[in-house]
Amino acid sequence: QVQLQESGPGLVKPSQTLSLTCTVSGGSISSGSYYWSWIRQPAGKGLEWIGRIYTSGSTNYNPSLKSRVTISVDTSKNQFSLKLSSVTAADTAVYYCARFFRAYYFDYWGQGTLVTVSS
Amino acid sequence: DIVMTQSPDSLAVSLGERATINCKSSQSVLYSSNNKNYLAWYQQKPGQPPKLLIYWASTRESGVPDRFSGSGSGTDFTLTISSLQAEDVAVYYCQQYYSTITFGPGTKVDIK
C-alpha cells in the first residue's frame, strides 16, 4: 500500500519561501506510470493543483503559480519536494502531495500539512 | 483553463435515498481519439484528504462501493449515490484532466 507523508515548517513569514517534502513509502517513486504532484486547499475552500513532476525530473506547473513554484525529486530518498517563493497570506493552506496516475487523476494522497503564512 | 462548476452547492438527503451531484465543464473534456471523458470524482471527509471515487467519468476505483456511480459525457457529468449511507457525508469534487488540472468548487452532502 503506497503511503505519502508531507513534512516541513508549519509557519512561514511573508515574502519568504515555503518548502515542503513528500516521502513516499510502500512503493518506488520511480514506478513508470506515475507522476507526483502537489495540491493545496485553503481552509474551507476548494482544491488547487500546484504542479507535478516525473521521476526524470520533467515538471509541469499551474500557470497561475508557475513563476513562484519549483518541484524537484530525489529518487534515492523516494521523495519529492515543493518550493513556493515570495509567499503571502493567500498562500496559507493545507498542502497535499499525491500520486498522479499518468498525469490523469490522483489515486493516493498524503494526509496534508497546514502551512500558515504570517509574520 | 477549463472552469468546472458543480450544483447544487449542498444537499441534504435522507438515509437510503438517492443523492445526485452535477458537474459541468466550460469546454468538452471528451478526447475524441480514444472516446474517453477526462473527468474524475473525489470524496473528502472533514480533516481527511480527498479520496478517488471515479475516473474516466464512470469507472469506479477499486474498493469504492457500487452505490457510487458516475455518468455523463462532453461537458455535463453526474455523480450518483444510489442509497445514501451515514458514512457518505462529505464534500464531493469533480476534476478534469483534459488540460491543466482544475477542480470543481465542491458539493456538500449531509443527512436530512
Image: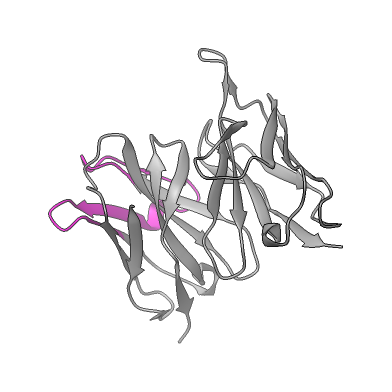
Question: Can the viewer see residue A83 in this picture?
Answer: no
Question: Can the viewer see residue A30 in this picture?
Answer: yes
Task: Kindly identify the residue that appears in the image at 25 percent across and 53 percent down.
Answer: A72
Would residue B39 be found to the left or right of residue A87 on screen? right
Relative to residue A2, is residue A117 depicted above or below? below
Relative to residue B16, is residue A31 depicted above or below? above
Would residue A72 be found to the left or right of residue B23 on screen? left
- Residue, far bottom: A119
Residue B110 occupies which quadrant of the picture?
bottom right
Q: Is residue A76 magenta?
A: yes
Q: Is residue B60 magenta?
A: no
Magenta span of residues? A53-81
Assign the C terminus of chain A to one quadrant of the image.
bottom left
The location of residue B97, given as percent across then percent down, is: 52, 35
Scheme by which the image is coloured: one colour
Relative to residue A21, is residue B56 depicted above or below? above
Q: Nearer the viewer, residue A26 or B34?
A: A26
Task: Kindly identify the residue that appears in the image at 52 percent across and 45 percent down.
Answer: B63
